[in-house]
Amino acid sequence: MVLEQGHAIEIVDMPINMGPQHPSTHGVFRMVLAVNGEQVVDVTPHIGYMHRGGEKLMEAMDFRQGIGYADRTEYLAQFHAELGYVMAVERLMDLKVPDRAEYIRVILCELNRLSSHFMFMGAFGIDAGLFGTSFTFAFVQRENLLDLFEEISGDRLMYAYFRVGGLAWEVTDNFVQRVHEVLKQSQQGIRDLDDLMTKNEIFMGRCQNVGAFSAKQAIAYGVSGPLLRASGVPWDLRKDEPYSVYDRFNFEIPVGNYGDVYDRYLVRLEEMKQSIKIIEQALEQLPPEGPIVPEKMPRRLRTPPGEVYAKVESPRGEWGVYLLSKGGDKPYRLKMRSPSFCNLSALREMTIGQYLADAVMILGSMDIVLCCVDR
Amino acid sequence: MTLPDGQDQEAQNEAAQPADAPPPSGEAAAAPPEKPAAKAAAPRPAKEAEPKEVARVAPPAGSINELLAAAAPGVQMKAYMVPWSPGESVAVEVGRDDLTAVMTAARDDSRLDMDYLRCLSGVDWQEEGLEVVYHLWSFTRRHHLTVKTRVTYADPSVPSIAAIYPGAEWHEREARDMFGLHFEGHPNLVPLLLPDDMTDHFPLRKDNPLQEIEEWQGVNLREGAGEGDE
């Protein structure tokens, strides 16, 4: 560009560093954005700040110890992480989990989905500029759910409650009543957030037509979970490859039309309502008593040699566990297919061409867990 | 479990351990302790039966590997069944030179139409080399397939499939970090999870020891694992 006075100006893309300690990166994550004015022309994500070699560590742990590590990897969907891991071991050992244990697992997983999505709603509201309101609304509800998990498992976050073959111990006597109570509160919470955010003019303005991702792109990048469904692909492992007892419930898979940030929010909101539907059915069908571990449970957890790929639909997408065993009580190799990792790999494609301010929204809408990305 | 039961079990454990007998099964533990010998003898054949090698079962006729063979003619492949949760899946082993042809066929052939790369894992088989495992899924045909390819330590080069499945880009970078696999034709094969300058150390290889504390945890906690009250 040449100004009138004859001074030449060189226009360059400006790199902007965001993170690793940035309030809107939801963890330790850094990206370097190259911007031309307000428009993002390139993104270089840097991950690995929380890499602890979890897969290596799990090779040194036996099948009981690994459960705790699965918790710590996916720390917002702990029950799902545990379930994926124990399902892999159970499949290799050919264990049949009793019905009562399966129902309790489903109930807890769906409650966990609620708590995880509440976390998303709260944090995403802050990203969108709703200040603390959405966060406090959501966290009241999350707290109720965590209280219930604590009553059952003895821990607020790291439950280690699912065990190979079933559950660690029986749920509390007032379990059904407590779940009903919490569901009632959660329904109110969902309504509150719905009222606060969905039709909020500013929120809609911040979200609509931002970071749109087509179904084709999402599939190519291995995106899963609410992000994929927001792009219009009705794919949910609970329906498509039903595990546990999910084939016994009636529920719908919400899908979006545009694949933008707003659709991702709507899909998650609807998913929460569907989760409540599943829990209500599961509570009705829950056998009032019965074993929670198989009758012929081996006292040593040893698998025959072999391999298995187990997967569950976590709140963030497909949580897969690829387990290779050479026999014995430890995995030979354990790969955790983290939905956050795969979704995040599409960040560059999603963000290029968007405005700088929207980069935060796009990242927020992915609802990543950095521990799960880095493992 | 009530306290007296637990005590019984412990006593029984102590009695059973020095005899180098296999651990009593849950059934034996619940039985009265009068005749432990008769009960403990029952599960013994089970331990011998624990196989050391994986039995390779060929997929039934009409399985997906036949479609793949038709879509990628002339490719040498070994197909067998592997456990999948839920159900079972077909795995095919192919040579690394055929990998690009197989992956392209898997994605583009309308009979296969495997448009989704679920997972890509590196595996260190020590003296048997390094392996890359690809899990594929088709949204339209709704079937899945596992593809494996193996390379040696000396020449850990695998063709990159990032051009076929863009999602493989990060997976391949991770496999490079952890196993030292080299993905030929990868657009940006630099460390992803590891520090930028850590290019000659591969943490997930089996010859890479755990740190002392981690070994200690593993060994000490593992002792007696499974003999407790579960």
Image (tube, helix red, strand yellow):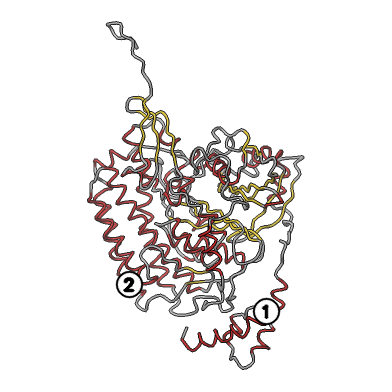
SS of the residue under disc 2 = helix
Residue A251 relative to residue B119: left or right: left
Q: Which mark is residue A123?
A: none
**Along the line of sight, the residue nearer the viewer: B19 or A73:** B19
What is the x, y in percent for residue A271?
A: 39, 55
Q: Which residue is mark 1?
A: B20
Left or right of A34 in this view: B49: right
Question: How far across and how far down the image is residue A61, in percent?
Answer: 54, 63
Looking at the rendered image, the quarter that the N terminus of chain A falls into is top left
Question: Given the image, on which type of amino acid does mark 1 rest?
Answer: Asp
Q: Nearer the viewer, mark 2 or mark 1?
A: 1
Q: Residue furthest front?
A: B212
**Is the residue under label 1 in contact with that under label 2 (CB below 8 Å)?**
no
Q: Label 1: few (<14), some or many (≥20) within 10 Å?
A: few
Q: How many numbered tags mark residues here?
A: 2
Query: Residue B85, image x and y in percent?
Result: 58, 60
Q: For residue A178, which numbered disc appears in the image?
A: 2
Return the residue nearer the eye: A202 or B175.
B175
Q: Tell me: residue B25, above or below residue A132.
A: below
